[in-house]
Amino acid sequence: MPAAVPSSRCKQTFQGDALGPTLDLCWECIYIVHAVVYWVARIIWDERNRRHLLEDNAARRISPTEVEEVLQSPSSLRQRGRGGELRVVGKTPSGRRLTVIAERPAAGVLRPITAWET
C-alpha cells in the first residue's frame, strides 16, 4: 500500500487488527468514517466462485481481473457485511464501478463470492 502523508489537522491513526497490519496513517488519509482497511496478499479463485462470476452471471460481463483490480485498489471502499463478509466498492482502471462481496478465510486472503456493476 502506498504511504500517505497524514493531514496536519488529523492526528488519529488506524491500529489494525487480525485482518490487516497496523498502519500509521491518519483517518483522513484512509477512506471515510466507518470504512475498514484490509491488506490483500492473496485472492482465492476456485471452480465455484469462478463459475458463479463467469457463467451464472455471464450477462454482467465482469472478469476475474476486474474483481481483483477492485479488491486490490487502495482507493476502494471496504465495509464489513452483516455475515462477516467484506463488501468492496471501487473502480477498475478502465473506469467501471463495481461492488464485490468476498469472504476473508484468513488475514490478507480474500475469496470473491459475487460482483455487480454499481
Image (tube, rainbow, N blue to C red):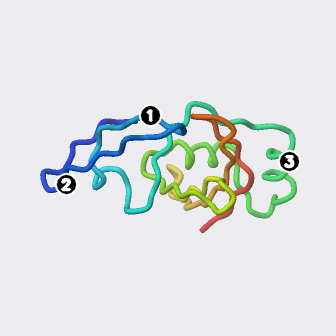
The residue where tag 2 is placed is: 10
Q: Would residue 42 appear left or right of 52 to someone viewing this image?
A: left
Numbered-mark total: 3
Tell me the amino acid under the disc marked 2.
Answer: Cys
Of the pair 32 and 92, the residue shown nearer to us: 32
Q: Residue furthest left?
A: 8
Q: Which of 47 and 84 is in front in this view?
A: 84
The structure residue drawn at horizontal position 74% and vertical position 62%, both measured from the top left corner, is: 60
Q: How many angstroms separate mark 3 from mark 1 (CA)?
A: 32 Å
Secondary element at image label 2: loop
Tell me the mark number nearer the camera, choosing from 2 and 3.
2
Q: Quadrant of the C terminus?
A: bottom right
Q: Is residue 105 left or right of residue 31?
A: right
Q: Which amino acid does label 3 sit on?
A: Arg
User: Type of residue at label 1?
Assistant: Pro
Q: Residue 25's x, y, as percent?
A: 29, 43
In the picture of the structure, the residue carrying the numbered disc 1 is 21
Q: Going by the image, does 56 lie left or right of 11?
A: right
Q: Horizontal and vertical percent for residue 12?
A: 25, 50
Spatial CA distance of label 2 from label 3 is 45 Å
Label 1 CA crowd tier, 10 Å (few <14, some 14–19, many 20+): some
**Is there CB contact under 8 Å for labels 3 and 1?**
no
Mark 3 and mark 1 lie on one chain; the one further toward the N terminus is 1
Q: What element carries label 3?
A: helix
- In the displayed structure, would residue 85 be above or below residue 45? below
Residue plotted at (57% across, 46% down): 71
The relative height of residue 79 versus residue 108 in the rendered view (above or below) is: below
| Residue at image point 13% right, 51% down | 8
Residue found at x 69% / y 47% = 103
Is 11 located above or below residue 60 in the figure? above
Viewer-side label of 3, 1: 1
